[in-house]
Image: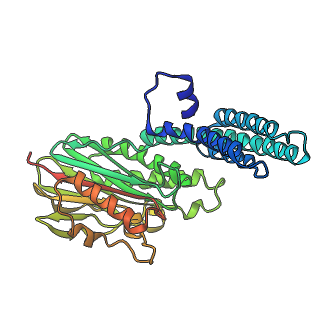
Amino acid sequence: MPVRRWLSDPHRTWRPGHALVAVPLALIAVITVADLLAPQEIQLSPLLVTAPAITASFAGPWFTAVVSVITIADEVMLGAQNGLLGSRGMQTQLAALVVVSACLVLFAYVRDRHMKQLTQVRSVSETAQRALLRPIPSVLGPLRLASTYLAAEEEAQIGGDLYAALRTPKGARIVIGDVRGKGLPSVGDAAMLLGAFREAARRHVALADVVCHLDESVRADLEENAQECEDSGENFITAVVLDIPDGDPVVEMIDCGHPPPLLIRDHRLVSLEAVHPSPPLGLGELAEPVYQAEVSRFEVGDTLLLYTDGVIEARCPGGGFYPLAERIGSWTGEGPESLVGFLRDDLLSHVGGRLGDDAAMVAIQRLAH
């Protein structure tokens, strides 16, 4: 509790927020002086209850209790000064002040406890995010990368969107995906896919074999959870898996029902629509796909933007979808960090600060090798 720590440490540096401590004490002093100077028929002491009420709005239970005790003692002093301490009216005021003060102290205690629990939850959430959704390296060989993640769940740091990037002997492998659903219930599926990708990306040479392994992992996970979750059979994960070799200015891509990447070249935008799209991961048994990597040019200076449908399906208060391609056209910065930061701020502005679905973006720029 900031106020309590400040009171217990007189050598703590003064901050503007510490001025709040003086507000209830100054209020008590002003009301006391005004009551003593006012005619006897005018009683201002009932206004003293505002001091503990104001204190409880910013301080913890200990300082609220201190102000409450000072307020009650001041009420008694003013009653004695005016010769009204034994009257029923003054006794009623004192009783009401005691009850209100006790309620305010209890309120401050409950709020403090809730804030501590919320801080712990945030800490666990951040730890889980670092463990499951590891930060993408800023440089992978001749690639420069940047990413951002926006969870739809309030107070959450992670959700059902996922991304990962790692080095292979010949280049880099990158995945971005979106678990059906949103928020914390989908975290387990996202963690499973990320683990499967990190294992398969290093084991298999061909990109198609990597995607086949991911599909089998998702289907196996759904079968294991079928008895626990009634709608597990309807779950799936959309994803785009990329291979970017170091020595060849191309990108190999397999799109499994995911929004297509966008290629920015010389301030022109190209959508890398899959000619042979594959079904979402987890539905391979139904569709029996033949995974085929598609090759596109990815030259020095080009930038690839990967994103989830939480970006393009984000709605403004008026109901309009976020115009991703149009907004990229208005970007005037340089580098993937600038692009991701611009789109993140612009997306939050578009929706009014609150997303309805998880959203993730990864920007990749090829540098001179």
- Give percent across and percent down for residue 252: 22, 57
- Give percent across and percent down for residue 260: 30, 66
Q: Which residue shows up at 42% across the image and 67% down it?
A: 351
Toward the viewer: 14 or 229?
Answer: 14
Q: Is residue 7 left or right of residue 246?
A: right
Q: Which quadrant: the N terminus?
A: top right
Q: How many marks?
A: 0
Q: Is residue 205 above or below residue 323?
A: above
Is residue 275 in view?
Answer: no
Q: Is residue 324 above or below residue 281?
A: below
- Give percent across and percent down for residue 188: 52, 48
Q: Which residue shows up at 45% across the image and 77% down it?
A: 319
The colour style of the image is rainbow
Q: Which residue shows up at 61% across the image and 41% down it?
A: 24
Toward the viewer: 108 or 99?
Answer: 99
Q: Is residue 363 left or right of residue 129?
A: left
Q: Which quadrant: the C terminus?
A: top left
Is residue 287 in view?
Answer: yes
Toward the viewer: 326 or 35?
Answer: 35
- Give percent across and percent down for residue 186: 52, 54
Q: Which residue shows up at 16% across the image and 55% down it?
A: 334
